[in-house]
Amino acid sequence: MRKRQPDGKWRGTRQSVAVSETVLRARWVEAETIHLKRIGLTFDAIADQITRIGKRQAQAIVAIPDGVTFPPDFQISRQACHKAFRKAIAREPSLAAEEFRKLDSSRCEEMFLNLQPGIRKGNPRSVEAGVKVLRHSAQINGYAAPQRHELTGKDGSPLTLVQLLEAVGPIEDEKD
């Protein structure tokens, strides 16, 4: 059975996969995007940085592979950076998600530590911001208490199943 090269050309079963310069450049963009996102840059800032790197106006964090060159008019959009980020995350979802959860947790800890002087003085805005940081930290780490939602009627009492069905209307049976 014949297989295809990454660029779409056919290859024989005994022929090795030839990774093109375009594929290498795309993988580098993914790696650079991940590193810049870890630092906390927006996708607009990441696109600007990668464009400057492609035009040799800035230094890359991730080493550019041998043989990879950029066209003189190289430019990348924030949407393309977002797509590269999503592809890179999709390759190793559990590892990347855990890594970003740890990164987000350490950012929360740093924010909370920076709010401590204001919290100790009783500054209401610092206390409010601290509570929000702690709530976010609890949500990303999965130890926030589950929230209970209750539907109530016009008088404030809980809805019964009969009242809910009357409000929703008749439910049609599915015909297979």
Image: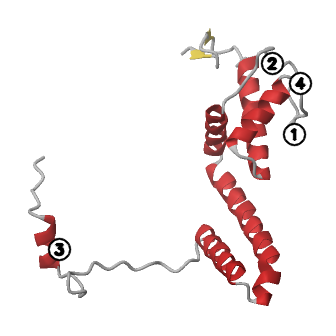
**Does residue 145 appear left or right of residue 80 in this picture?**
left
Query: Which disc number belongs to residue 61?
Result: 1
Would residue 37 be found to the left or right of residue 154 on screen? right
The quadrant in which residue 22 appears is top right
The local secondary structure at tag 4 comes to loop
Kindly report the distance in space between the C-alpha atoms of the residues bearing marks 3 and 4.
64 Å
Residue sitting at x 45%, y 78%: 147
Tell me if label 3 and label 4 are in contact, CB under 8 Å: no
> Disc 3 to disc 1, how far (Cα)?
57 Å
Which one is closest to the eye, mark 1 or mark 4? 4
For disc 3, the neighbor class at 10 Å (few under 14, some 14 to 19, many from 20) is few
**Colour scheme of this structure image?**
secondary structure
Query: In the rendering, at what x and y percent does residue 70 appear?
Result: 80, 18
Give the amino acid type for the residue marked by disc 3 in the picture. Leu
* Mark 2 to mark 1 CA distance (whole Å): 16 Å
**Do the residues bearing badges 2 and 1 touch, measured as CB atoms within 8 Å?**
no
Mark 3 to mark 2 CA distance (whole Å): 62 Å
Mark earlier in primary sequence (1, 4): 4
Q: Earlier in the sequence, mark 4 or mark 2?
A: 4
Which is nearer the N-term, disc 2 or disc 1? 1
Quarter occupied by the N terminus: top right
Q: From the image, tell me which residue sits under label 2.
A: 70
- The residue that disc 4 covers is 56
Residue closest to the eye, 56 or 88: 56
Q: Are marks 3 and 1 in contact (CB under 8 Å)?
A: no
Q: Amino acid at mark 2?
A: Phe
Q: Nearer the viewer, residue 7 or 104?
A: 104
The residue indicated by pointer 3 is: 164
The amino acid at mark 4 is: Arg
Mark 4 or 2: the one toward you = 4
Residue for point 75% across, 52% down: 40
x and y, in percent, of residue 44 in the image = 69, 39
